[in-house]
Image (tube, rainbow, N blue to C red):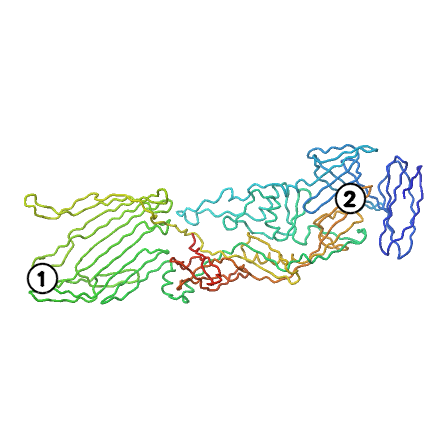
Amino acid sequence: MPIIISAPGPVRVTHAVQASPGVLARVAHQVQATPNATPARVTHLVTARPAQLARVTHAVSARSTPGPPTVIRQGRPIRQTTISSSNGQVLSAQYTHSGTREALVLTVVGAVTPAANSMLNVTVSELEGSLSLGSLALSLDADPNQYEQRTTASGVISTLYGYNKAASQLGSYRLPELIPWQLSPTPPADFRVPCAGRPQLQQIGVTDTLVRAFSQAGVTLNLPTGDPFVSQTWRERDRDYSTLNKTPDQVFADSLGQLGYTYVVRGSGAYALAPGQGFVADTVNQLDLEGQPTIRAEAANAPSRVIMTGAPLLAAKVDILQLAASAPDPASLTREVTPTMDWYVTTPTAGGEVIKGFRKVLGVITGTVELILSDVTVTETVNGTPTSRTFSHIVTGFTSSSSMYDPNCSDAMIRQDTVKKTYSYTLNTQTTSQIFSGPGFIGSYDTGDTLSDESQTIFQTFSAEGYLSARVTNATKLVSLQQAAADGPAAGRGAMQGREYLKTVLSENFAPIQGGQWLRTFSLSGAQQLPLYDATSGDAVRLTTRGGTFNSASEVLDAAPAQVRCPDPCGASLVSYPQVLTAVLPAGREGQERAASVPMVADGTVLNTLMQNFIRASGSTVGSDVSLSSARDWRPGVTLSGAVQGVVESFTLDASGGLAHAKLQARRRIDGVGSIVPTIPANREYRDQVLWRKPGGVVVNHMKAIVSGVPTFDQIFVRVAGATQPNPGDELVWRVDTRFGPTATGNYGGNP
């Protein structure tokens, strides 16, 4: 009940309290010097022995101006609390700090209007006798657009609002683009430039990006508990990212937030904290508490399963040659996948054989040779009697071809030279021995008289868009033969020899027109043989040759001319595999699952370390709700030990009637326990390297798991439908069909 002191001077007030055993009892009463004076509140704390009444007597002296509030605690000196502010005489102050945001409501005497860019501040100082217990000073940005003024019987009272402007920007400020390649992408590679001279793909540190994002909002981000993404980067194309129109909070959630990190703000600084860790530490004594804390064991938030997905693992393609022994046709597979080699194949025929040689350089055929050998029997009538002669294992035909490719585009053939010869045999043919060689073989073989002799040279030009734009074909062909004593007896005839050759030039040009059609224009020019007649008799005298263009036209094509891809010689031969780690936590709750995505982490060892930390951070927690007997600076981010254990997550301060009361919530984490299991997501499409063909499909090198960054493989047969089959070394997309098993989806091909 209130006691009114009518005149200055000491007054003795006595009252009795009874508390439960070992529990502090707060007794407060209000004294007032005169009816118009400001009330003063006096509070003291007592601890009673079990079931025993304690009598407390204290004296108060009325003054016209009240002094600092006084707290009396049994066995301790008198404690005094002073609350002050440069914004005016404080009637009340309420401060809240949730970790990422903080706010202050300050009620002062007088008409106070906050100015733009001004600050609200309050200082709580405490003395115990003559000993200073320290002070808590708070300063926040004043909100000039939010305040309240009201008039009472005692005068005007102003309520002012303050907040951490920089912290509020973390959730509202829209970022510009901070990723360099989003602003200026690396241009496509010029294949004419050597690999070492080409611009490298751009990258930027994950944490550097986050720090820059906070800086854009005016906040300095610190990492006192360490950087889990040290040396990890966002990278152009394969580990892409963008900050455009995101907030700093979203960038935090995309990176450190995936690992369970939080941050706390202090002024214009922020501190990123690992789960269960703070950046300063302090010890709590029992006397720092007002009453006993409320303890909550929180197991319901512990997951039973955690999943972490990293960046795809870019693994080098397997060397198919090392597995060729398991292929249906090892020799054929070896020739197909070996980039540079010479070989030949001999095919028996009726009465002879055909030798074919091949030369491959950097994956393209640059030379072929075909040599036809056979037994030939010639029968002619000499003096009315059929006469025969047999030639054994002689050359009847020879063809060779050599090709040149654009050094800057390995599949663009720019020149091809072809030579074709055939040989004839008569009773009088005198064979000569010649050396014939080709890729992988060389030998001496007998030849007869020249029957045909052709050569052809093709020049090709490809447009910048990759299609054949021009082709010129120069051809030379034997069109007539001569023989000594051709009209004489068979026994006296000479060897047949070439007499006249016809040369032609075919010029072609290709250009796209609308509707997916192509225009081909061509002209054929060169020499043409015509018979010459006598003007008087009308008899053919001889053949003559006419030069010039004798055929020229154009036509519209529905099909495009030859196209080239220009494979990049600098491109790494890599296959992309998903990296997913899973762990089961036996202590977790059934059905609970927690997932983290770290698409910037491709290193399997780093991913494994992050997963282990993620498992530990996914255990149960113990929370504490605490009321403090004094205003201590235990704001979020402080690690407490002693009477209260855990990291402070929220803090409130309420000052009114001349006294300050503080509360906080702290949480202690219990490490989760689980074993990491590499996982391939089920019911998804797979992308694997083709090893070799088999009837009805292909065999792929299927990645079944990734253990500490090292993939393990199985060889699986995949059914492929359609006329076009994938080639060894291609990447094939497939999935498990419920009827046919592993089946290709139709997407396959080599690296671009």
Where is residue 113 shown, x and y percent of the image? 74, 32
**Picture disc at residue 490:** 1
Q: Quadrant of the N terminus?
A: top right
- Tell me the residue that label 2 is attached to: 654
Q: In this view, does 454 lie to the left or right of 86?
A: left
| Image quadrant in which you'd find residue 583 | bottom right
- What residue is rendered at 82% in x and 33% in y? 152
Q: Is residue 14 above or below residue 433?
A: above
Kind of residue at badge 2: Asp
SS at badge 1:
helix
| Image quadrant in which you'd find residue 572 | bottom left
**Picture disc at residue 725:** none
Q: Is residue 208 above or below residue 156?
A: below
Q: In this view, does 705 lie to the left or right of 723?
A: right
**Front residue of this view, candidates 256 and 81:** 256
SS at badge 2:
strand
Q: Is residue 273 left or right of residue 291?
A: left
Where is residue 78 shown, x and y percent of the image? 86, 46
| Image quadrant in which you'd find residue 593 | bottom right
- What residue is rendered at 73% in x and 44% in y? 96
Kind of residue at badge 1: Ala
How crowded pointer 1 is (Cα within 10 Å; few <14, some 14-19, many 20+) is rated as some
Where is residue 502 shown, x and y percent of the image? 19, 49
- What residue is rendered at 71% in x and 45% in y? 97
